[in-house]
Each structure stands twice: as structure tokens, then as C-alpha cells.
Amino acid sequence: MITSKLVKKTQCNKRQYDDTSESAPLIPMEPLPRDNKRQLTDTNQSSLIPIKSIPQDLLINVVARISSESYIDHYNMKVCCRDFFHASKDNYMWQQVSLEKFPLIPWSHKEAFDSFMQNCKEGGNIEALYRVGLQELKSFVGNIEKGMKDLKMAEEKGHLEAKYTYALILLCSYDGNLRKEGVEYMQFLRNAKCVVNCRNKVRTLLEGLWKRPYGTIMRNPTPLCYEKPCKCWNLKKGTWQLVDNEDDDDSIQNSCENCRWDVELDFFYDVLFYPF
């Protein structure tokens, strides 16, 4: 008896609810948002994730720009997003990375820095080739032959400071043909009016770093200029002076050019090495 009454009461309540629902005005309801996973399968991914709409070449340039600021930022960036990670694997990105803000030798995070520089080098970044070669020349345990090889590769690809460094090391040689090759490189830089600029950039990069001892690279003590008497280059009050003006072509006609490269070599050798 009690059960039948409950059933009747429930049916009555149901009819009453249906009647009130039919008479109530309809209120438009917004559909509930679906989960992201379902949205990605049903709609265009590029409209939901902004990074997907960035062209690949632009994304690579973004990664290169960030990597140029800090190799730590480069690492953090590529581990936070799969798209950044793939962009960081592109060789073109490594070629575009600027190393202007990086020291030649880091004081912290050396392993991360070395890995970063090696990736730049393998990606075809000629600035990295130059710097890795210069590191070998500056480091107490550096391999000079390996450093010279990297400098040679960088200068062949058009890196002017690498050509400057490589040429002056050739001028240290006891081999007459190598010294002649070094003079030709320096003449190329003079004709391009960039000797002083290259010198200043090398000095800035090496400034404050430890020097290797004399004798690490054996320097030929015989000067390039052996003519006596000689129409000396830029002789002032009995002392040699570094040329600080790129527009010196007029004065070279009546002066000994070899004297100029002897003075340039004196400066460069003292920047790299210190006496015992």
C-alpha cells in the first residue's frame, strides 16, 4: 500500500514538473566549453595555439635572437616548448646566432657554454669558428694546431678578425713562404681599410684574459724589414707607432710597408703572450 502511494506521488510530481516546464519561457544557454584535447581534434590547431601560426623561418629567427642574448636562455627556451626545440635544431639558426655579447672564455656554466659554442661551430657559424680557434691559442692547455685550423676555416669563409689573427701568426713563422702569405693577408686587410678595426676588436675580445707565456708560439726574431737604410713607416721621435687611421694609402708610397707589419706583430704578440 505504501509503495503504491509513493509511485502515484512520484508520477504526480513528474506530471506537475512537465507542466511547469512547458509553460516556462525558454532561456538560451551557452554550450559548455569542451576540454582542450577535444578542441584540438575538432578544430584548427593554429587558431588555438598562437605559436602554431608563426612561420617556421620567423620562429627560427626568434630562437636565434634569444640565443644571441644568453646561452642559458637558449637552453631554457628549447626545453619549455617543442616548437622552440625543433627550431633550435635547424642549422640556419646556429648560423644566425650572434656571439657579440658572449665572452671568449666563460667564468661560469663552462660545460653549457662549450656545448653551445660547439653547436654553433658545427652549424656553420663562422664567428664560433674564429672564437673556438682563438680559445685554443689563449688557453694554457690549448692545441695551437687545432686553433690555427679553425682560424684558417673562418678566414676562408670571410671572417676579417680571423684573417687578421691568422696572418699575424703566420708572420711569426720561420718559413719564408708562410710569412709571405701572412703579408698578403695583411695587404688584403689594408686595402679593405679594416686593419685598425680588426685590431681593436681582437684587443677588446682578449682584454682582461690571462696570457700564455712567450715561446708557446715560436716567433721568428728576424724582422720583415731588413733593408738598410729603410724609409721607415710612421717613425715618430725614434719610436714605432701603431697606425690608427685606415686611410693611409697615400703615405705607403714613400714608406716601407714591412715596417708597419713588424709594429703590428709586436702589438699582437704582446696581447697574446707575456714574457717569462
Image: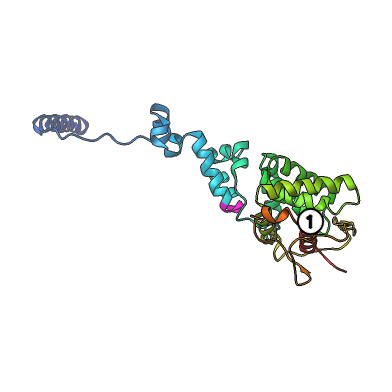
Image point (10%, 33%), residue name: 25
Picture quarter with the C terminus: bottom right
Quadrant showing the N terminus: top left
Would you say residue 117 sits in the magenta stretch?
no
Relative to the observer, which residue lies in front, 82 or 95?
A: 95
Task: Report x, y in % for residue 240.
Answer: 77, 66
Q: Which residue is mark 1?
A: 256
Residue 17 is left or right of residue 71, and the answer is: left
Task: Classify residue 139 as left or right of residue 92.
Answer: right
Task: Please indicate, yes or no, whether residue 81 appears anywhere in the rendered image.
Answer: no
Residue 70 falls within the magenta-colored stretch: yes
The residue closer to the viewer here, 244 or 45, is 244
Asked where in the image residue 272 lies, by quadrant, the reply is bottom right
Disc 1 secondary structure class: loop
Q: Looking at the picture, how far across and down is residue 28, in whole percent? A: 18, 34
Residue at the spot 68% in from the left edge and 42% down from the top edge: 158
Residue 107 at x, y = what percent? 69, 62
Graded by Cα atoms within 10 Å as few (under 14), some (14 to 19) or many (20 or more), the crowding at tag 1 reads some
Segment tinted magenta in the rendering:
69-73
